[in-house]
């Protein structure tokens, strides 16, 4: 219960990366995996920034995904965010995906999501209104419209 209260405090008050790392370790020791991932996520957000977007997944009949995925940051899909290789080829970038206010997201569904890029510097050009494409395999899995770019605080 105390861990939950501390997480709620951290959600409304500016806290440090160290605060989130300590809560993540406490959650790990209590075997509260979802809480641990949430705390790790919040520390990442402070250190590296995140992208909020509205994601619409393609339907099961159009894409490869047939089932919902857990919304807790375990999925790390590839994204076409407009970057190109030196040879002009499309470059895909990876970001962890956390769905807001849901336990899972399935084919054909839409939700607001948070993205934690594994290479944040490659995502710095994005701005509100940009449309990016999610890939788990071919064909694409969905499209997202950026609704907020949250820079690092650390």
Image: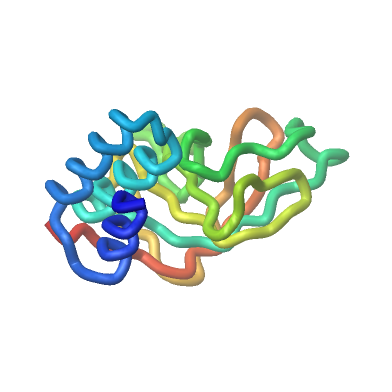
Residue 96 position in % (x across, y down): 43, 40
Q: Is residue 88 visible?
A: no
Q: Position of residue 92 (x, y in %)?
A: 47, 36
31 up-or-down from 100: above or below = above
Q: Residue furthest front?
A: 1
User: Percent from the top left, x then y, of residue 129?
Assistant: 50, 70
50 vs 116: above or below: below
Q: Residue at x 56, y 44 (%)?
A: 71
Q: Quadrant of residue 10?
A: bottom left
Residue 149, image x and y in percent? 36, 65
Which is more toward the observer, 15 or 84? Answer: 15
Residue at point 70% right, 49% down?
A: 57
Q: Is residue 84 left or right of residue 150?
A: right
Question: Residue at the location (56% across, 61% down)?
Answer: 112
**Depth check, front residue: 85 or 96:** 96
Can residue 154 be seen in this snapshot? yes
Is 92 positioned to the left or the right of 1 in the image? right
Farthest right residue? 61
Left or right, residue 10 beside residue 86: left
Query: What is the number of callouts on the image?
Result: 0
How did the renderer colour the structure?
rainbow
Using the image as rendered, state which of residue 39 and residue 75 is in the foreground: 39
Q: Tell which of 124 and 53 is nearer to you.
A: 53
Residue at horizontal 19 percent and vertical 67 percent from the top? 14
Above or below, 69 against 149 in this view is above
Q: Is the residue 63 above or below the residue 114 in the image? A: above
């Amino acid at each position: 219960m105390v861990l939950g209260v501390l997480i709620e405090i951290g959600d409304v008050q500016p806290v440090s990366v160290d605060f989130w790392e300590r809560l993540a370790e406490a959650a790990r020791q209590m075997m509260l995996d979802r809480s641990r991932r949430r705390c790790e996520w919040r520390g990442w957000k402070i250190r590296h920034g995140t992208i909020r977007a509205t994601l619409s997944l393609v339907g099961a009949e159009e894409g490869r995904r047939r089932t919902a995925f857990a919304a807790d940051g375990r999925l790390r899909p590839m994204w076409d965010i407009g970057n190109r290789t030196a040879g002009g080829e499309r470059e895909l970038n990876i970001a962890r995906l956390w769905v807001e206010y849901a336990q899972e997201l399935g084919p054909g569904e839409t939700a607001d999501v948070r993205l934690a890029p594994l290479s944040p510097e490659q995502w710095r050009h994005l701005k509100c209104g940009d449309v990016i494409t999610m890939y788990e395999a071919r064909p694409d899995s969905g499209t997202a419209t950026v609704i907020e770019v949250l820079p690092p605080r650390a």
